Image: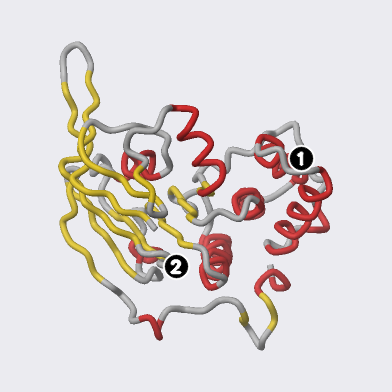
Amino acid sequence: MLQMTQIQKIYRTELIETHALRELSVTVQEGEFVALTGSSGSGKTTFLNIAGLLESFEQGTYLLDGEDVSHLSDNERSAYRNHKIGFIFQSFNLIPDLNLFENIDVPLRYRRFPRADRKQRIEHALETVGLASRMKHLPAQLSGGQQQRVAIARAIAGEPRLMLADEPTGNLDTTMAQQVLELLEEIHAAGTTIVIVTHDQGLASRAQRNIQLVDGKVLEEESPHTQEEIPQAVMLNGGEPLAAQL
């Protein structure tokens, strides 16, 4: 699904060069749930931006879903990103003046889905995250955990092959963070490839595989679970779907 080979990214100013990624090589197979960890300045955010086709890089090769995306133009990256990748941000990035339905509708409009198709996708996504009854609410009328679930709904409405999450529980209390993590596990169990960038070791331990970055390089990889041990969150607490419990 994702294969980066010898990626180098340098940020330059008039006075200084900052090597954010140094010959970084990372592979994520289709259907994996991977956590990328590291301290501040280790290159996690730069990796995520390149993985999501938000930034270019100086050297190396990036294959996404089998296609070399290393030299795409800005317009080509945007089109590829809109069709293949879903994003979840720590700060939610919801539009405050739009209700939940409208927030999820915005990226679908950019992709020019027919109105009936958009409506079906939005309603299904909100039902998946347990917020179908609140689709006319504004973001400010929701808790932080609920806003993050809207952000997840926005991401899954486009049916991405790859979901990238930047500290998805960073602004949430323990209870809300647990609910969001279980929801991500449910989405992963349905077949979506997920890569989470986090400094939270508890969150990272729930992934199939951990990749630790130090100074823009992979320091080590480890698998906290075997495939059979990965928590499958499709059915929880007596067999009820997760969305029914949130």
Q: Where residue 204 sits in the image (x, y, percent)?
A: 36, 64
- Camera-near label (2 vs 1) is 2
Residue type marked 1: Glu
Distance between the alpha carbons at the discs numbered 2 and 1: 30 Å
Residue on which the image places disc 1: 102
The front one of 109 and 219 is 109
The three-letter code of the residue at mark 2 reads Gly
Residue 170 percent across, percent down from the top left: 46, 51
Image: 171 above or below 60: below
Q: Earlier in the sequence, mark 2 or mark 1?
A: 2
Residue 229 falls in image quadrant: bottom left
Pick the front one: 116 or 100: 116
The 10 Å Cα crowd at callout 2, few under 14, some 14 to 19, many 20 or more, is: some
- The answer to whether residue 201 is seen in the rendering is yes
Q: Residue furthest bottom?
A: 238
Residue underneath mark 2: 31
Local crowd at mark 1 within 10 Å, few (<14), some, or many (≥20)? Answer: many
Q: Relative to 231, does residue 118 appear above or below in the rendering?
A: above
Horizontally, residue 175 falls left or right of residue 72, namely right
* Residue extending farthest front: 67
Residue drawn at the location 17% of the way across and 61% of the way down:
220
| Quadrant into which the N terminus falls | bottom left
x and y, in percent, of residue 81 in the image: 50, 41
- Report the residue at 36% width, 58% height from top: 200
